């Protein structure tokens, strides 16, 4: 069952990339740069090979990670690796995506915890549509795809964000020493 879900999720992401490329070439409305497309395809490959499991950011041996004092936490809505997902039809979803981005972009945050909080936020948004069956079902499908994309292919985004948010320092490095340097 998991393999079938992986194949379907991968197909949907690849399809989305091709559609966005076709639109960008025909209308000039979207601009995807080749690096983002390659990163997205690498993310799919990582996912298919199971590399997303136990995704952690680690410093080289003999070092530990501390928050980078010069890093500013950032967010960019829904999407990853240059692919943006339009969520205008679901008020509040962009806020969930931004909170998820900020979680990934905060040093030493646990990726699984960020993903769980994201899924919970998305589920709460859909509860607002419970009275309208079609809207509720549409919300569930959209948010499930967003959550599946984050959990299955978010490892690269998580590691990239952690690499910017954290500094690797020697194990004997002390916070007091850091404060003196600033």
Image (spheres, rainbow, N blue to C red):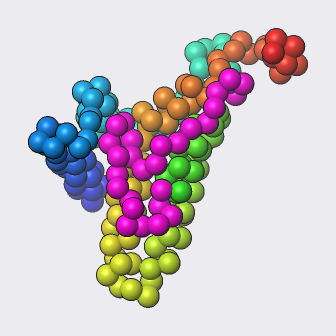
- From the top left corner, tell me how far across and down residue 138 is, in percent: 33, 72
Whether 66 is drawn above or below 128: the answer is above
- From the top left corner, tell me how far across and down residue 70 is, in percent: 68, 23
Q: Residue at x 38, y 59 (%)?
A: 87
Whether 125 is drawn above or below 16: the answer is below
**Horizontally, is 31 left or right of 166 in the view?**
left
Which residue is more in the foreground, 178 or 52? Answer: 178
Q: Quadrant of residue 58?
A: top right
Q: Is residue 177 visible?
A: no
Q: Residue at x 19, y 39 (%)?
A: 28
Whether residue 107 appears in magenta in the rendering, the answer is no
Q: Quadrant of residue 177?
A: top right
Q: What is the magenta range?
A: 67-94
Whether 132 is drawn above or below 69: the answer is below
Which residue is more in the foreground, 176 or 28? Answer: 28
Q: Residue at x 53, y 42 (%)?
A: 75
Q: Is residue 75 visible?
A: yes
**Horizontally, is 160 left or right of 32 in the view?**
right
User: Which quarter shows the N terminus?
Assistant: bottom left
Whether 171 is drawn above or below 112: the answer is above
**Horizontally, is 176 left or right of 4 in the view?**
right
User: Which quarter shows the C terminus?
Assistant: top right
Q: Residue at x 74, y 15 (%)?
A: 171
């Amino acid at each position: 069952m998991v393999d079938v879900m992986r194949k379907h999720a991968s197909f949907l992401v690849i399809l989305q990339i091709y559609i966005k490329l076709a639109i960008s070439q025909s209308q000039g409305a979207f601009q995807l740069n080749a690096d983002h497309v390659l990163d997205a395809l690498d993310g799919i490959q990582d996912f298919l090979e199971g590399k997303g499991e136990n995704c952690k950011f680690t410093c080289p041996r003999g070092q530990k990670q501390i928050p980078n004092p010069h890093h500013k936490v950032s967010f960019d809505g829904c999407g990853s690796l240059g692919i943006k997902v339009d969520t205008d039809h679901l008020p509040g979803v962009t806020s969930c995506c931004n909170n998820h981005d900020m979680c990934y972009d905060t040093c030493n945050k646990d990726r699984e915890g960020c993903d769980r909080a994201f899924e919970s936020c998305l589920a709460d948004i859909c509860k607002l549509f419970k009275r309208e069956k079609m809207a509720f079902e549409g919300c569930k499908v959209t948010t499930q795809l967003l959550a599946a994309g984050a959990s299955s292919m978010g490892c690269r985004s998580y590691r990239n964000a952690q690499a910017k948010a954290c500094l690797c320092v020697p194990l004997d490095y002390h916070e007091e020493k850091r404060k003196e340097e600033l």
